Amino acid sequence: MSRIGKLPITLPKGVEVKMEGNKVSVKGPNGQLEETFSPDIKIEIEDGTIKVERPNDEPRMRALHGTTRALINNMIVGCSKGFEIVLEYSGVGYRAELKGKDLFMNLGFSHPVDFPAPDGITFDVDAKAHIIKIKGRDRQQVGQVAANIRKLRPPERYHGTGIRYQGEIVKLKAGKAGKTGK
């Protein structure tokens, strides 16, 4: 049995889950998410818990079992609490600010970079701490937006400037080792 797949999912207060065949829709305080899953996996809602079961032990079913349970759990957490990823930026002249819902950044290019907020994503900028917070209800979308922002100016290996995830460790390389000798 999958260690992840066999765990029941408890529904928090204020979250509704509806099933139509193999389509699961979750509605909560942060919004609504829908996802269609494989018809081979059995999903049951009983007394405020959701159980995910597989019909057999084939490798494909074993893979779908844990994945289906994790995706449903992410939908429930996203609609109740939401997800957040924090990015840090550092460098001479690097700035970030919000204009409406969109994110505008100066990242050492000859032009400012504007990053429009996709549906379901909100940005929060702390200019003094050099932090950008990305918040949303869809875990995959929050992670993808964070990766796209980081890709604009990834951490540089010699000075450590650029955009990085909070807590990410970037091992700095030594610079030129001048001439030694006679």
Image (tube, rainbow, N blue to C red):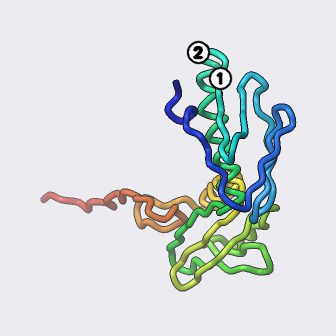
Q: How many marks?
A: 2
Identity of the amino acid at label 1? Arg
Quadrant assignment, res 51: top right
Disc 1 residue crowd, few under 14, some 14–19, many 20+, Cα 10 Å: many
Identity of the amino acid at label 2? Asp
In this picture, residue 160 sits left or right of residue 75: left
What residue appears at the point 62 percent right and 48 percent down from the top-left corner? 10
Q: Secondary structure at mark 2?
A: loop
Q: Looking at the image, which is closer to me, 84 or 6?
A: 6
In this picture, residue 106 sits left or right of residue 21: left
Q: Which mark is residue 54?
A: 1
In this picture, residue 36 sits left or right of residue 112: right
Q: Position of residue 120 (x, y in %)?
A: 78, 62
Q: Looking at the image, which is closer to me, 48 or 2?
A: 48
Residue 27 in view of the camera: yes
Q: Position of residue 40 (x, y in %)?
A: 74, 22
What residue appears at the point 65 percent right and 32 percent down from the top-left corner? 52
Q: Looking at the image, which is closer to me, 41 or 163?
A: 41
Q: For the view shown, which residue lies furthest in the left direction?
A: 182
Q: Secondary structure at mark 1?
A: loop
Q: Which mark is residue 77?
A: none
What residue appears at the point 35 percent right and 57 percent down from the top-left corner? 173
The residue pinned by badge 2 equals: 57
The reply to whether discs 1 and 2 touch (Cβ–Cβ < 8 Å) is yes
Q: Looking at the image, which is closer to me, 5 or 94?
A: 5
Q: For the view shown, which residue lies furthest in the bottom direction?
A: 128
Q: Position of residue 170 (x, y in %)?
A: 41, 58
Residue 148 in view of the camera: no
Q: For the view shown, which residue lies furthest in the right direction?
A: 20
Above or below, comparing residue 14 to residue 36 in the picture = below
Q: Position of residue 60 (x, y in %)?
A: 64, 19
Quadrant assignment, res 20: top right
